[in-house]
Image (cartoon, helix red, strand yellow):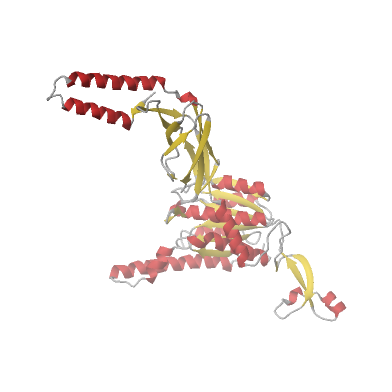
Amino acid sequence: MRFVFTRRFYLLLAFGLVLLSLAWVNPSLIWLTLIYDTLLFASAVFDYLTTEKPDRFVFERYCDHRFSMGAENTVRLAITNEATRPVKFLVKDEYPTEMMPSVKEAEVSVSPRRTREFNYTLFADARGDYSFGGIAARYDSNLKLIWKQAKFKINQTIKVYPNIQEAKKNELYAHRNRELRMGQRKMRFKGQGREFESLREFVPGDEIRHISWSASARRGKLVTREYQVERSQNIVVMLDAGRMMTARIEKLTKLDHAINAALSIAYVALSGGDNIGLLSFCRKVISYLPPKHGYEQLNQVMEGLYSVKPQLIEPNYSRAFNFLSANCRKRSLIVILTDLIDRESSAELLTYTQGLIPRHLPLIVTIGDNDLRGLVKQQPKSVSDVYRQSVAEELLQQREEALARIVQAGGLALDVPAGRLSFELVNKYLEVKERGLI
């Protein structure tokens, strides 16, 4: 077992050096100094031998096995002192080095036969698997001349998931925005769904096709049908993990933003009684989760999302869309979270997306390129600036043309900034439900 000397020891040792410095005046002090230093070091050895061994202490770590990305995650350490004296500890947890702790070490005093706890937080900025090591600790000795050092092995693995709290916030904001009432009772938002809900008197602005002519004849005035949004419909999220999704926007990659959006729509869809599925792909299909409903499906979606990493290779749209067609027969809203650059690179994606129509309703969702838009708005100061702006304008135009092709073919498109991606996607999903498009 290792140890280090305390401040008290060094102060006492310094006093011995003072005696030694006076030996030039009185040579007899040399012998006194030698005796003093010998006793000091002998006391330190005695202190080491008589101080409790590490097995008199118990260290425990408590934390959720699921951490949230982009959030402060609490870790609790408990120290039990089984010795008969109070003990002071200097504790340092071996947390994952990729995370940022609120404190790196702590000083804790524990009474005899007592347990003391303290908390700290870890900030995770990336998804995936992470491991804790042991807990390193120093504790003071009986005479306070040394710190004994020990390491308590408490290896632990945790998973960092997308932040579910952000998904819940997006649901709340979207519901408020559309004046929806969610709860334990059945969800209803009146609009152009497919399930009949009630009859009411016709008012200007109602669609003629919803008039109930038989009920109008009986009542002697125009009566229209109201519908409620259907439940148990399919939503499948296709997540592109290819090269274009490696680009960073602030601290997150485009894939991180896409995953947050996927989790948001999954949470809202499952809350509303719909089925949610997930397909992630790059050169091949990474994972597939068939559409289902229920709380357990949300856990499965999180398991399918937490470990997906962007790859510096081009995605194979052929494999992904053929796999989807073979495994998803029921009409579904297919949310394709990807990125588009120009007409040529997006041609294959658009071809396969159009192939989903009319069996499915595709919704291509891309993250707006603020850098390009900002470049276009700048006042050029040189000829090179003019050239760069021309290229940026051309890329933006080709991006808009590509998305317009999907809309013209009967699909949907959404191109929004990263900061509003999740919120706008949830709103688009609710709009699709209200209009009865699935």
Image height check: is 7 above or below 302? above
Image height check: is 192 above or below 236? below
- Where, quadrant-wise, is the C terminus in this rendering? bottom right
Residue 13, picture quadrant: top left
- Where, quadrant-wise, is the N terminus in this rendering? top left
Residue at image coords 75%, 73%:
210
Residue at image coords 42%, 28%:
150
Query: Could you tell me residue 11's position as x and y percent?
Result: 28, 31
Residue furthest left in the image: 25
Query: Could you tell me residue 42's position as x and y percent?
Result: 31, 19
Residue 84 is at least partly visible in this image: yes
Residue 77 is at least partly visible in this image: no
Query: Could you tell me residue 96's position as x and y percent?
Result: 45, 40
Quick one: 393 or 231, which is closer to the camera? 231
Image height check: is 273 above or below 399? above
Residue furthest right in the image: 218
